[in-house]
Image (cartoon, rainbow, N blue to C red):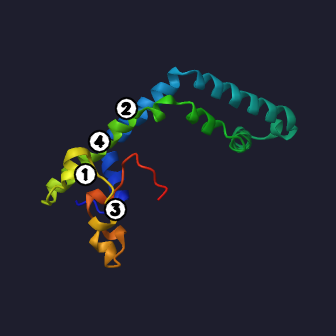
Amino acid sequence: MSINHPNQLVEEFKKSGEFDRLRKLLLQEFMDSEGKAALHARVDDIAKQKLGTDPKLQYMPEAGVSREIMQELERFPVVERAVAQVTKLSDPAFAAGMKEAIRKILQDDRIAAGQPLDDALVARGPKRKTAAAQPQQANGNDSDSDSSASSMDIDDESDSE
């Protein structure tokens, strides 16, 4: 398989086991943090408030009560706040490890497809091409059709161009 689209890269990232490894790492950090207790406390507060202010819930089946409480929880950014407190997501070493895993997937894909390796891919991973290095765009071709691994930007550079 040749990776030609970012969705294919995501699928290969998942197949490699790296996604599950990172997911478990992040979950463990959250479980060991104070954020877990804060999340539980906030969920308890919201659920108790809903149960205390809506008397019809006493007469509903358990599944209906759960559905009503879940709808109430969705009104608040409880999960977003908990995720924002996970420090690993802003750790440069975490991002570097993820980039290295992606670079390896792209490099292995190129080797399997018998395509020549881009020096930038081998040296440090995919790098954004300049306009001069992209003759396809100069000819009016859509850059999304470029199957080059170096067209998939995973650098820390700002995307505010």
Seen at 30% across and 50% down, the residue is 12
Seen at 36% across and 50% down, the residue is 154
Quarter assignment of residue 156: top left
Q: State the separation of the CA atoms marked 1 and 2.
A: 20 Å
Marker disc for residue 143: none
Q: State the separation of the CA atoms marked 4 and 3.
A: 17 Å
Which residue is label 1 attached to? 106
Q: Secondary structure at mark 3?
A: loop
Find out whether the residues at labels 3 and 2 contact each other: C-beta distance under 8 Å.
no
Compare marks 1 and 3 and give the one earlier in the sequence.
3
Which residue is label 4 attached to? 101
Q: State the separation of the CA atoms marked 4 and 1.
A: 9 Å
Seen at 69% across and 31% down, the residue is 43
Closer mark to the observer between disc 1 and disc 2: 2
Q: Quadrant of the N terminus?
A: bottom left
Which residue is label 2 attached to? 93
Marker disc for residue 5: 3
Find out whether the residues at labels 1 and 2 contact each other: C-beta distance under 8 Å.
no
Q: State the separation of the CA atoms marked 4 and 2.
A: 12 Å
